[in-house]
Amino acid sequence: MRVTRLSVANFRNYRRQDVQFQEGLNVISGANAQGKTNLLEAVYLCCVGRSARTPRDKELIMWGAESSKVTLRFEKRGGDGQIEIYLAPNSNKRLLINGIPISRIGELMGELRCVFFSPDELSIVKDGPSDRRRFLDISISQLSRPYFYLLGRYNKILSQRNKLLKGGDSRSLTDTLPVWDAQLAEHGAKIIYHRRKFIEKLSPLLKKEYAYLTFETIEELKAADGSPTNTADTKEEISIVYDGIDGETPEEIRAEFLKELEDKRNRDIKNGFTGAGPHKDDFCLKAGSMDLTAFGSQGQQRTAALSLKLAELEMFAAATDEYPILLLDDVMSELDLSRQARLLKKASTRGVQTLLTCTHLELTPEKFAAFTVENGKIIEY
């Protein structure tokens, strides 16, 4: 997969810009607050239908403009394609794929896949469970449209159950809650099953990428050719474990989920919301025996988050036989030189198109396309 052309109109600080990206590594440099991140945000928007920075579409529209448009042209194994997104402050966004309007965001999922990393993605490791659930859900949804629709159905059922818990009388609670419980457990069990399977496949890739980033010196990295087969050369091994309702199959998870809903029904009625299910689940990242969320240093958390994203990149490639677009926003300044070298090597992997933003590069890649951004203007040089 690769982006061939991106056109934006009244998007963030871009009045009207058109840029053609090249295969391989594309480096977008410039001073802070010039619009580098906005380009990556536009690509991400076309991949998953939402911004990576804000849930409010109207914030993407240039101040004072009545509407905004993003057009992205791409190539992938199945052929060329085009995605168009129209934004207006007082109406829902409109999406078109190859000129055909789509009515549901789910139809966009998997059309063009991406992996996005910025310093804010550190929240996956150091912040609350909702950030980790969001990582799982966006990643799995890009691989599976049915999963995206499953999330939507689950959330509607959850909303109805919570509404009943808050305002239902004793009779309606007695008569109706079991009905909602059955539906919630049915859909929730499938979500948990998909998440567990995703993490099961992600785990060995995460260990490999963490090892790749934590070699002691650049010389060790060159000696290993950037492809460690185990983590014996690292000081610590990373692990990832899903924390949620137990079960090996959807049926087993469903039974456990139902039991938990029944056991904690009085608590839910008292609190007015559902306290168990995939909307409350989490996953734990550990370096050795240390919980990285609670006790990891800033450097360890940053390396773990970046490793997670690189593992996601390889996961997509393994599942689809094609690399997604890699979006790296202002990452280099947060890394030491050895990790910068490793990341640039990964970003230049054959078959990976990378869009990387930075103020400047301390290391010069062997081959890359260079762009500079100044006050919403893009120049290729």
Image (cartoon, grey):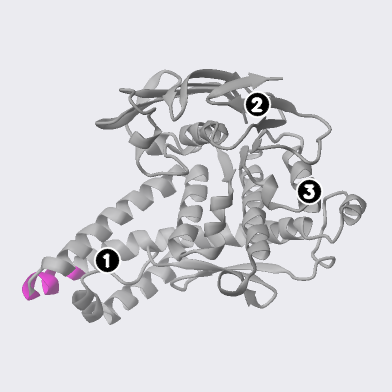
Q: What element carries label 1?
A: helix
Res 290 quadrant in image = bottom right
- Give the side of residue 70 with respect to residue 320, left or right: left
* Quarter of image, res 22: top right
Q: What element carries label 2?
A: strand
Check disc 3 and report the residue beneath it. Answer: 342
- Residue 263, visible in the rendered structure: yes
Q: In this view, does 239 lie to the left or right of 73?
A: right
Residue 312 coordinates in the image, percent (x, y): 62, 50
| Amino acid at circle 1 | Ala
Dot 3 alpha-carbon crowd within 10 angstroms: few under 14, some 14 to 19, many 20 or more: some
Residue 239 in the image, given as x and y percentages of width and height: 65, 68
Disc 2 or disc 3, which is closer to the eye?
A: 2
Q: Which SS class for mark 3? A: helix
**Which dot, 1 or 2, sits closer to the camera?**
2
Image coordinates of residue 190 in percent, x first then y, are 42, 59
Amino acid type of the residue tagged 3 in the rendering: Arg
Label 1 or label 3, whichever comes before in sequence order: 1
Q: Which residue is drawn at 43% across and 49% down?
A: 147
Residue position marked by numbered label 2 in the rendering: 372
Q: Distance between the residues labelled 1 and 2?
A: 55 Å
Considering the image in quadrants, where does the C terminus appear?
A: top right
Q: Residue at x 7, y 72 (%)?
A: 169
Tell me the CA gap for discs 2 and 3.
Answer: 23 Å
Other-residue count near label 1 (Cα within 10 Å), few / some / many at <14 / 14–19 / ≥20: some
Kind of residue sitting beneath label 2:
Thr
Q: In which quarter of the image is residue 379?
A: top right
Residue 182 - label? 1
Measure the C-alpha gap from mark 1 to mark 3: 49 Å
Q: Mark 2 or mark 3, which has the lower sequence index? A: 3
Q: Residue at x 54, y 51 (%)?
A: 120
